[in-house]
Image: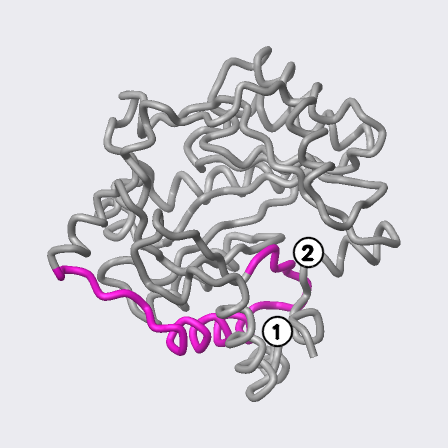
Amino acid sequence: MGLDSYVNTFGSVCKQKYGERIRKLTIDAKFTCPNRDGTLGKGGCTYCNVASFSHEHKTELSIQEQLAQGRERLSTKSSKYIAYFQAYTSTYDEYLILKQKYDEAVQDTDIVGLCVGTRPDCVPDEVLELLVGYQNDGVDVWLELGLQSANDLTLKKINRGHTFAAYEDTVKRARRLGIKVCTHLILGLPGEEHADYLQTLQKVLAVGVDGLKLHPLHIVEGSTMAKAWRNGKMQLLELESYAYSVGELIRHTPKEVIFHRVTAYAKKPMLLGPDWCAYRWNGLVAIVDDLEQKGGQGKYLENSL
């Protein structure tokens, strides 16, 4: 059986809602980040590929051209898609510029959803009101927040430039307006272990969340962490440890929370380690095996009421 048999996945929720599989079309709208442009810093997060800062944007295509190209690249087509502003901090610009870019992304009738990825400290009220407007027009809106860890010491260590309090404030303001929030978490950050991942999850659930994305820490060329890894100062998660922790987090998560992702991979030679992250299916197969053996989403909560 697949992940959908044990987890409330984004894919299964969309299929139930729309009657077919909905695909995300990623967009690079040439945003930057306050942790890159000097507002907060110039080094970026320690896991980011700093070498790419001078040539961050790999495309000169318009948003409409990127969406068209994304449709063509898909091996299996759909009649409905989600426009996903994935690259960098996609709320970090002036209101009118954001509106122009979002408007362009949702103008086609086959775009039924809008996902906006950003930092917790870059979401003013006017941006939330803008997103509410699309939602009121029938667009399925998701605000994706990169938290990574709820531990402020960890956030400082990886040079995130924000605190958990900033995340909590943004989530509460967004969900008060009815905007769905998907939170990104990284497992394997320096100084953290399984108990820390569980603590982060509990704090995120206590604030309130609609979706989760889980990622293993992987080291990429050009990052600050790459230097530490090469000097033997970093230990990376083994596949078995990652699958165990993800399984435990899933079993501690209420069934109504939607998992948008439970693992991630990167391509060599950009990827330095761990090696298992070079293959798309390694993490997923190990996680499904764990869930099959120990139970799926919400199992640990079933007898807690």
Side (left or right) of 27 relative to 231 = right
Pick the front one: 152 or 107: 107
Is residue 247 in the magenta section?
A: yes
Spatial separation of the CA atoms under disc 2 and disc 1: 14 Å
- Asked if labels 1 and 2 touch by Cβ distance under 8 angstroms, the answer is no
Q: Residue at x 37, y 76 (%)?
A: 241
In this image, 205 relative to 33: left or right? right
> Please, what secondary structure does the residue beneath circle 2 have?
helix
Outermost residue to the bottom: 293
Position in image of residue 6 (x %, y %)? 66, 75
Mark 2: amino acid: Phe
Residue 102 point in image, percent of width and height: 66, 23
Disc nearest the viewer among 2 and 1: 2
- 97 horizontally vs 2: left or right: left
Q: Is residue 49 above or below residue 289?
A: above
Q: Which residue is mark 1?
A: 297
Give the magenta part as a residue range. Answer: 232-261
Residue 10 is labelled as: 2
